[in-house]
Amino acid sequence: MTLGAAAAMVTVDDVRRAYARIRDSVFHSPCSRSDTFSQLCGNQIFLKLENLQITGAYKERGALNKILELTPEELGHGLIAASAGNHAQAVSYHATKRGIPAQIVMPLATALNKVMATRRFGGEVVLHGANYDESCDEAKRRATEMNLTFIHAFDDDAIIAGQGTLGIELLSQIPDVDVVVVPIGGGGLIGGMACALKEINPRIQVIGVQTSRLPSMKAAIDAGHLVTLPMASTLADGIAVRRAGERTMPMVQKYVDEIVTVEEEEIASAILLLLEREKTVAEGAGAATVAALVHDKIHCKGKRIAAVISGGNIDVSILSRIIERGLAKDGRLIRLRIYLEDYPGALHTLTGVLAEHRANIVETTYDRKFGVDFGNTAIDLTLETRGTEHVKILLEALAKSGYHFERIR
């Protein structure tokens, strides 16, 4: 271990004490078996629904444990935190509930729903910085300047222990679980959970999931030291952390068996599957575990697997775009550019072929000016289809009918 070796790590006893401290104030979220994902994955899949917490994510556990551990003097100064959304809401809710003022620094590009929710829970929102790291630096500066008590989103022992209570709770629901799949941002959740799970039952396999856009923990583990990744945008903004934690990395080194990554389209597909099949709304970070399972990133068969759905605070204004990405990934939404001779009835003939093969037209755009010969037209069609096999049949039918076309998406 190259980092944090001299400092004692969070222990399972710390997690147990945190669980006793917060259990009456945090929702005991369900962990139900999913027939859909069990069939898709060839395992017994259970979904730990932390998206049902009052603030919509697991972050309440760590935030509350930290607040309850602070001295009256520290609480009296007031609190400050930095967050892209879920930690912000958790600190705001539990601080306000106890009459403690809380200031939250959030990146400028934070989704409006998360900003509004943080304010609704009672926090004073300060928008600053292009990403979490810049917001965190500003929060630390303000903490020093204004003598506020800083609550880190993940790199703090009380936070880690509080998030770890999710592991103890999960074991009370599925004592014989074989594998637990957990999303990773800075590492607070998986560090605490893995500690609890492995110390109670060492045979349990713990697998972490990161977005391929920002795999900061995986990069740190591979390199043997912390690394700072370039800024990147991702659907999984809840785990979009450029640099893993100093306190969390050693715990991941010690307890986590494997870290896998998922792509943006895979996350979108998982959000759609959860929405359609499980009637569960998950944000990108919350759906990352399901994305890893469904897209064969986790190589297990016949196991009892629990996947943590860590949050559900998704911005409804972008939900339609995420659904469209998921539909495109599944082959249920495609866009074609088809070249036609420009004469009366040409479009009617084309739509006849589409109707015969049960493809529904969602959107059309005509182009007679650019990239087409005189007397011809190009038509862009967005089509609803039934999946990749249906798309294959449809494209074969268009080719057989003599149409020249290209697939745009």
Image: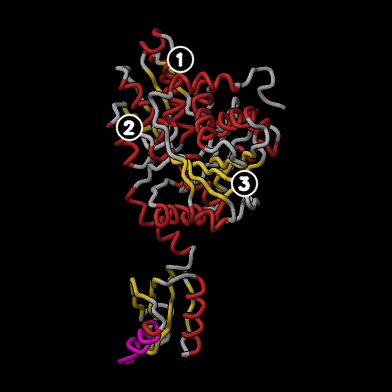
Q: Quadrant of residue 91?
A: top left
Query: Which residue position holds label 2?
Result: 118
Residue depicted at 35% across the width and 46% down the height: 315
Residue type beneath disc 3: Val
Q: Type of residue at label 2?
A: Thr
Q: Nearer the viewer, mark 2 or mark 1?
A: 1
Q: For numbered disc 2, what is the local secondary structure?
A: helix
Q: Which residue is mark 3?
A: 260
Q: Nearer the viewer, mark 3 or mark 2?
A: 3
Disc 1 from disc 3: Cα separation: 34 Å
Between disc 2 and disc 1, whose residue precedes?
1
- Residue 306, horizontal then vertical, whole percent: 54, 43
User: Residue at coordinates 33% horizontally, 27% vertically from top-left?
Assistant: 93
The residues colored magenta run 343-354
Q: Is residue 141 above or below residue 312?
A: above
Q: Is residue 353 magenta?
A: yes
- The single residue placed furthest to the bottom in the displayed view is 344
Residue type for callout 1: Glu
Q: CA distance from mark 2 to mark 1?
A: 22 Å
**Secondary-structure class at tag 3:** strand
* Label 1 secondary element: helix
Q: Residue at x 70, y 37 (%)?
A: 223
